[in-house]
Amino acid sequence: MLDDLDRALIHALHIDGRAPFSQIATALDVSPQTVARRYRRLRTEASLRVVGLPDPHQAGQTQWLIRLTAAANSAQDLAYALVRRQDTSWVKLTSGGTEIVAIIHTPTDVEASNSLLLRDIPRTSNITAVSAHCILHTYLGGPTNWRRSTDALDEEQQRVLREHEAADTSYVAVPRQLTDSDTDLLMALQKDGRATHAELAHATGWSPVTVARRLADLQAGGAIFFDVEVDTGHFGANTRALLWMSVSPAHIENVAATLAGHDELAYVAATTGPTNLVAQALCRDPADLHRYLARRLGSLDAIHTLETSPVLQNLKAASPIITDLARTRMPSAPARARG
């Protein structure tokens, strides 16, 4: 379990993923060395990582939530093959280990090739069922954080972290959209959202000043945001489940907005398909999940059907790019399962 300082540091990173340790230390009233040590420990023990991600719409991407049913003896290998791909995120094993759930990022351009959806998955042996749900709107998730991971700091501490003291005060950020020239920058941020300007300059071939200004412009325009990956089990969320709901179109906005205010949920999105609303619940134990389903969801008459899929393993989080550390933890997949 995390202590108060760990939770405060994670909350601080949610507010500003690239805040200097000195600024975080000021808000938390500890030394920068203490913040740095805690950050390194959480990276190792709680899978903590700050990642820079593009807004899907501005990046010309469509997100698909897929559910694959596979033979029990091949599901894990297939899941890890999806983990290794750079067009997937949030890969999970659910429902007794025979179902794989993942988000696939595809080009929105109708002329582009969606090879994973149209070719690779249909040709993969041992997959017995496939359903794909286009994510139409995200009500909770992405730049909006799970409330129980952002409840450690008071208003004054949050104010300190939101004060941005630009090194070049003569420069005013101008909102920009993503272009093809930002590809290398995005790749570097998806690996490590806290990479220094010098490290990002090396990855892009730009100068550190150009990197700093481009980052400021993209953030000002909402083209990129910084997310915090962390093992939620350290917050006491040991029972996790995906909730597949069917809601009439006339009520979906109201139901989704209500669900987005529930502390038990970390993700809420409207999708295509017979279950047109999906959520992820993070609860202490099965009894806690039962209370949430029976009392809070059960009070929403507009939810016509509900399917609950327990999450057994989270194999990949928000970033499509896995680090070398994560790669060393994965077993080799057989050739038939490689993406």
Image: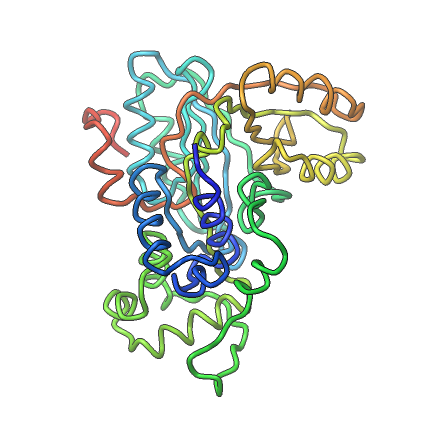
* Relative side of 39 to 134, left or right: left
Q: Position of residue 275 (x, y in %)?
A: 64, 26
The image quarter in which residue 247 lies: top right
Q: Position of residue 233 (x, y in %)?
A: 44, 29
Question: Residue at the location (54% across, 55% down)?
Answer: 57
Tell me if residue 62 comes above or below residue 289 in the rendering.
Answer: below
Nearer-the-camera pick, 227 or 95: 227
Q: Quadrant of the N terminus?
A: top left
Question: Residue at the location (50% across, 50% down)?
Answer: 108
Total number of numbered discs in the rendering: 0
* Relative side of 280 to 41, left or right: right
Q: Position of residue 125 (x, y in %)?
A: 30, 19
Q: Quadrant of the C terminus?
A: top left
Nearer-the-camera pick, 157 or 79: 157
Nearer-the-camera pick, 203 or 7: 7
Q: Position of residue 12 (x, y in %)?
A: 49, 54
Nearer-the-camera pick, 202 or 155: 155
The image quarter in which residue 203 lies: bottom left
Tell me if residue 140 comes above or below residue 212 in the rendering.
Answer: above
Question: Residue at the location (57% across, 28% down)?
Answer: 281
Tell me if residue 240 comes above or below residue 265 in the rendering.
Answer: above
The structure's colour scheme is rainbow
